[in-house]
Image (spheres, grey):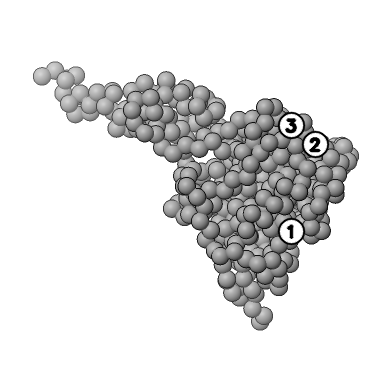
Amino acid sequence: MCFVTCARKIFGTRTQRRLVLGKPPNFARAKMEYFRRCGRHPAMQFGQVRATAYDAYHVGHGRRAGSQNKIHGSDSHLKVFGNNFGRTPADVHPKSDDVKIHASYAPRNPPLARDSCAGKVLFIDAFTAGIAGDMFVAALVDLGVPFDLIRTQLARLDLEGDYSLNIVTTSRSEISAPLFFIEERMQKPLLPRNFKDVKTLLEGSVLTHGSKQRALKTFTLLAEAESSAHGVSVETVYFHEVGALDSIVDIVAVAVCLDYLGVNEVIVSPLPIGRGLISGAAHGALPCPAPATVQCLCAADLSTYATYTDGEFVTPTGASLLATLMTGISDWPRRFLLERTGYGAGIKRWRHRPNLLRIVLGTVEEA
């Protein structure tokens, strides 16, 4: 028996070895098919797309692929390419195989009544995976804010475009959590808004006074952060990614939820900070975290720590909301009597941590 025959019996053929490793026989074709279906960039690292490309290959070969869903989240829909990651364009709906969609969303907690949380503490536990606007909205709904309230209040805004609000059940590390996202049905992306446009939109709305003031305060902080980064006046600052429809919805939805709950004290955990470059932004490649994010964190003296991981854990929308709403910083509130908790899932799947924002409602015992 020749050496080649012996080696094949021991190690198998190249095709067999590829199947054992999770690679289809024609992996290059499957990989490009995956990019075509999902809108991913060919520079993405092989390890990040191997399983999904394998599923995409078998879609055309009679095997059922993993769960796929077209999702357009807010400013958390990022793709990591080594040390570079970018935001998807507004008219692209990436498919995400790591989101398990269920038929309906079952709330974790019973609904909360208006002003039922007055005098209580809301703890934002973003230590594990950071925060984005859509994650914050999902966690508040999971805590007990009625989702119909958000729909009703946002309908009062004179927002251009055809869109729908969606919330579905997913899981991260087998922890069930809602995923909030916006589905846009526009033929072309809307023009970017400047701070004056957003301010006029909010002031002219029929939102409650508390919701309007929280949203205006958040956008004012964002405008100041962008003004500092780009060297222009606050009134003429143009919001590109942050001024898009999804980010306006996220900020207003969070403001509506907190006004409904009546929470006066918001404590925030230390925030994880990633590294790398943000590509695909309107101004070109940006360092991670984004300049607007850093400026918002500086404005509120929020505590951070390095993750030594490529990717954006804290988005400008998430940073501005925390900087506007926070009343204290703590790893965990002392003598904290917990009442209920809510989770909000992000689209991104991190390798060593679940992409979940956890918020906890309770009271602090007096010493």
Nearer to us of marks 3 and 2 is 3
Contact flag, marks 3 and 1 (Cβ < 8 Å): no
Residue 205 left/right relative to 73? right
Which residue has dot 2 on it? 193
**Residue drawn where x is 59% and y is 45% of the image:** 166
From this viewpoint, is residue 279 visible? no
Towards the viewer: 97 or 276: 97
Contact flag, marks 3 and 2 (Cβ < 8 Å): yes
In this rendering, the answer to whether 34 lies above or below 77 is above
- Looking at the picture, which amino acid does disc 3 mark? Leu
- Looking at the picture, which amino acid does disc 2 mark? Arg
- Kind of element beneath mark 3: loop
Which disc is residue 190 wearing?
3
**Residue drawn where x is 60% and y is 73% of the image:** 336
Nearer to us of marks 3 and 1 is 3
Instruction: Choose the circle earlier in sequence order: 3 or 1.
Output: 3
Residue 258: x and y in percent read: 70, 60
- Kind of element beneath mark 1: helix
**Residue drawn where x is 65% and y is 75% of the image:** 364
In this rendering, the answer to whether 227 lies above or below 91 is below
Which residue has dot 1 on it? 325
Q: In whole angstroms, how far apart are the C-alphas of marks 3 and 1? A: 29 Å
Residue 141: x and y in percent read: 60, 56
Q: Quadrant of residue 256?
A: bottom right
Report the number of numbered marks: 3
- Looking at the picture, which amino acid does disc 1 mark? Leu
Residue 183: x and y in percent read: 61, 38
For the C terminus, the quadrant is: bottom right
